[in-house]
Image (cartoon, rainbow, N blue to C red):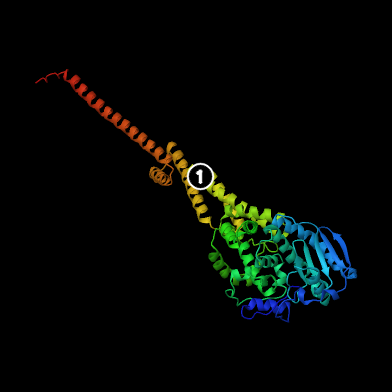
Amino acid sequence: MISSRSKPSSLILIILVVVITFHPQTHAAASPGLQEFDCAKLPVVGWQEVLIGDYAILYPEGYEDSLGSLKQLIEGSLVNQYTTFSRLFNTTLSLPINIRVYPSIESFYCLNVIAPQVSPDDTHTRIGIREIALFGDRILNNYTQWEAEALNIFRYELGILFIEQVTNSKAPPGLLAGAGVYMMDPKEIFEQREISAGGIGAPEVTWRSLWESDSTLIYPDERYQAVSIVAYLVEGYGWDAFLQFLTDLCTSEGYRQSLTSVYGIDFSTLQREWENYYPLYYQGRWMAHVLYGFDLSPYQTMIAGGAYTDAALGIKDVITFLEQNDQSVKLAEAQALQEQAKSGQEASSLVAQARLALQNKQYTVSIQLADHAQAIFDGLGDQSRNEELDGYRAVAGEVLALQAEMEQLYQEYYTGRGSSDSMDRMIQTSQRLAELGENQARENISTIIQEQEAANSTRLNQIYLGLLGVILFLLALRFYLLRFKPRPEVI
């Protein structure tokens, strides 16, 4: 169990709540070191060993009856947990991982000359990069609580072992502590313990003080501040970038250099961003977790805003990550979002096709494509393209209606059934079609008008010729009649 000490000058509300929730009593100092024990008086420990998957349990004789739940935990959860962490960190540990149960904190210090310092009520720590140490006497003092917290405790310690492996043991202590806590299921820290943080403001400690202090690795109040830094980096820039940062620590001069190298942002800017993120984390952003509650809301926002291509590209990598880490529930949600993004891409493509069909005067096709796109958008609850689609349908529909009317007017005209207003109506209709980009009707009307003018001209010429013929006939008749003089009258 992770315990605490009281540091009133630096604790903020959330840390006080965490400390009170985890342990009603506070402590002024960590457990004493090796020099404060008389190791000669401790009984000799006879060790037993049992192998379970990737783990080796080392325990004192006489602890057999107390190991039942530990064995079940390893067989039921820790074997899969190692696989999950191995995929997450893209590495493996030297196996088997030793889980050593020390009969007491005294035996732990006496048997390990370089044993790390632990807080007074902690039930666990680690030695090197292969051993998770448990303190049997402290576990047995509150075995029920230990059983409830055991899985999360192993996640914490296992996470630190992986980080030590990835960084070649060059991670600062506060990074180890924060990343270890980040590997724990946050619901067991916040939700199940009903921790509230409505009044949390900016942190009262600096990023540097949290990461560079050995006490951050020992005391929960500081661990639970340091985890917000890891959460900020992972949520803000992604797990891949965080893993790259851990890997870069192997060869860099320090964590600041690695932060700048990987994130491309100077440390002071990162710290200001973290300070802004800090209250949000305790107010609920802790629920956004790459392992226990992957945050899909950015992709939901993209889809809601019509950014389907961006969402599809981003969600593809997320699905790969979730598949690799066996997050079946979130994987199903991500796949559903991917289908929505693909549907949105299809609908957007149909909109473009509808516009192109309209430009190419394929009016019926344009309407069909617009209707198909509209149906998909309606299924997505997206109304952002409605006005555009309505515009395409309106133009195409009006052109088709006017073309049908023109065809009827043509038939009436050529069959002689048209009224005196037919020509005026044809002219008006052709003008409107021309405004809509359809010029054929106006060309047809021009041809008709030319034909009418030619016909009228021919008829006039025929009339003129007829009149001229009549005149010539009358003149000829006159001349003819003049040839015959009338007889003189007898007086």
Disc 1 marks a residue whose amino acid type is Leu
Which quadrant of the rendered structure holds the N terminus? bottom right
Report the side of 69 relative to 343 (left or right).
Answer: right
x, y percent for residue 479:
18, 20
Helix, strand or loop at mark 1: helix
x, y percent for residue 286:
65, 68
x, y percent for residue 30:
72, 76
The answer to whether residue 332 is seen in the rendering is no
> Which quadrant holds residue 261?
bottom right
Q: Disc count in the image?
A: 1
Check the image and name the residue furthest to the left: 491
x, y percent for residue 240:
64, 56
* Rendered view: 98 above or below 339: below
**Residue ID at (58%, 62%):** 256
> Which quadrant holds residue 490?
top left
Which residue is nearer to you in this view: 272 or 219?
A: 219
* Rendered view: 326 above or below 467: below
**On the image, numbered disc 1 is attached to which residue?**
356
